[in-house]
Image (spheres, grey):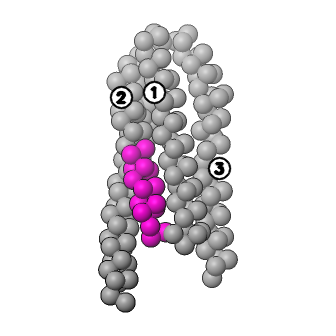
C-alpha cells in the first residue's frame, strides 16, 4: 500500500516538474520572440503590458507549483491532515486568484490587438486562462475547507480517546 501511495505522489511530483518546463521555456525563449514579432506589428503601449503581465503571472504560477510540491511532500510524510497542508492550499488559492487578476488586466490590451488583427481567438485564449485559474482557485478553496473540517473532526476524536 505504501508503495502505491509513494508512486502516486512521485508521479504527481514529476508532473509538476513537467508543467514547469514549458512555462520556463516560454519565459526564457518564447516571450522574447513573441515580443520581437509583436513590436513590429503593434503599438508599444499594447505589447509591453501584455508581455509584462505574462512574465508577472509566471511568479504566482511557480509559487503555486512549489506549494503543490510541498503538499505532496506532506502527503508522503503522513502529514496530509495538518495546518501545513491547509496553508499550502491557501497559498495555491491566492496564486490562482493572482493569475486570474493579472490575465484579466491583460484582456483589454488583448482586445486591442485582436481587434487590430481581426482575430477574436486571442481574447478567448486569455479567457481560458482566467477561467482555468478561477476553477483552480475554487477547487483549492473547497479542498482547504474540507481539510479544515477533517482536521477539526480528527482533533475532536483525539480528545475523546
The location of residue 91, given as percent across then percent down, is 43, 49
Where, quadrant-wise, is the N terminus in this rendering? bottom right
Q: Is residue 72 above or below residue 42?
A: below
Picture residue at 51% right of the left edge, 44% below the top: 63
Picture residue at 39% right of the left edge, 27% below the top: 106
Q: Which residue is mark 3?
A: 18
Q: Is residue 135 left or right of residue 64?
A: left
Label 1 to label 3, Cα distance in Å? 23 Å
Mark carried by residue 157? none
Q: Are marks 1 and 2 in contact (CB under 8 Å)?
A: yes
Q: Secondary structure at mark 3?
A: helix
Mark carried by residue 105? 2
Q: Residues within 10 Å of mark 1 (few under 14, many from 20)?
A: some
Q: Earlier in the sequence, mark 3 or mark 2?
A: 3
Q: Are marks 1 and 3 in contact (CB under 8 Å)?
A: no
Q: Residues within 10 Å of mark 2 (few under 14, many from 20)?
A: some
Q: Secondary structure at mark 1?
A: helix
Q: Is residue 152 above or below residue 42?
A: below
The location of residue 146, given as percent across then percent down, is 35, 68
The location of residue 103, given as percent across then percent down, is 40, 33
Picture residue at 34% right of the left edge, 67% below the top: 148
- Residue 39 among magenta residues: no
Q: Nearer the viewer, residue 102 or 74?
A: 74
Q: Earlier in the sequence, mark 1 or mark 3?
A: 3
Picture residue at 38% right of the left edge, 63% below the top: 143
Highlighted magenta segment, given as a residue range: 80-96
Q: Secondary structure at mark 2?
A: helix
Q: Nearer the viewer, residue 16 or 130?
A: 16
Mark carried by residue 53? 1
Q: Nearer the viewer, residue 77 or 98?
A: 77
Q: Is residue 114 visible in the rendered structure shown here?
A: no
Amino acid at each position: 500500500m505504501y508503495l502505491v501511495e509513494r508512486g502516486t505522489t512521485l508521479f504527481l511530483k514529476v508532473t509538476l516538474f513537467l508543467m514547469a518546463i514549458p512555462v520556463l521555456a516560454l519565459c526564457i525563449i518564447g516571450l522574447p520572440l513573441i515580443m520581437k514579432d509583436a513590436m513590429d506589428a503593434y503599438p508599444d503601449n499594447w505589447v509591453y503590458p501584455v508581455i509584462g503581465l505574462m512574465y508577472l503571472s509566471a511568479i504566482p504560477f511557480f509559487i503555486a507549483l512549489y506549494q503543490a510540491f510541498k503538499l505532496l511532500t506532506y502527503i508522503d510524510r503522513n502529514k496530509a491532515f495538518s495546518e501545513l497542508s491547509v496553508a499550502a492550499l491557501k497559498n495555491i488559492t491566492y496564486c490562482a486568484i493572482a493569475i486570474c487578476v493579472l490575465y484579466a488586466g491583460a484582456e483589454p490590451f488583448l482586445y486591442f490587438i485582436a481587434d487590430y488583427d481581426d482575430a477574436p481567438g486571442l481574447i478567448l485564449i486569455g479567457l481560458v486562462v482566467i477561467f482555468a485559474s478561477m476553477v483552480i482557485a475554487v477547487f483549492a478553496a473547497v479542498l482547504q475547507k474540507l481539510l479544515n473540517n477533517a482536521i477539526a473532526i480528527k482533533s475532536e476524536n483525539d480528545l475523546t480517546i
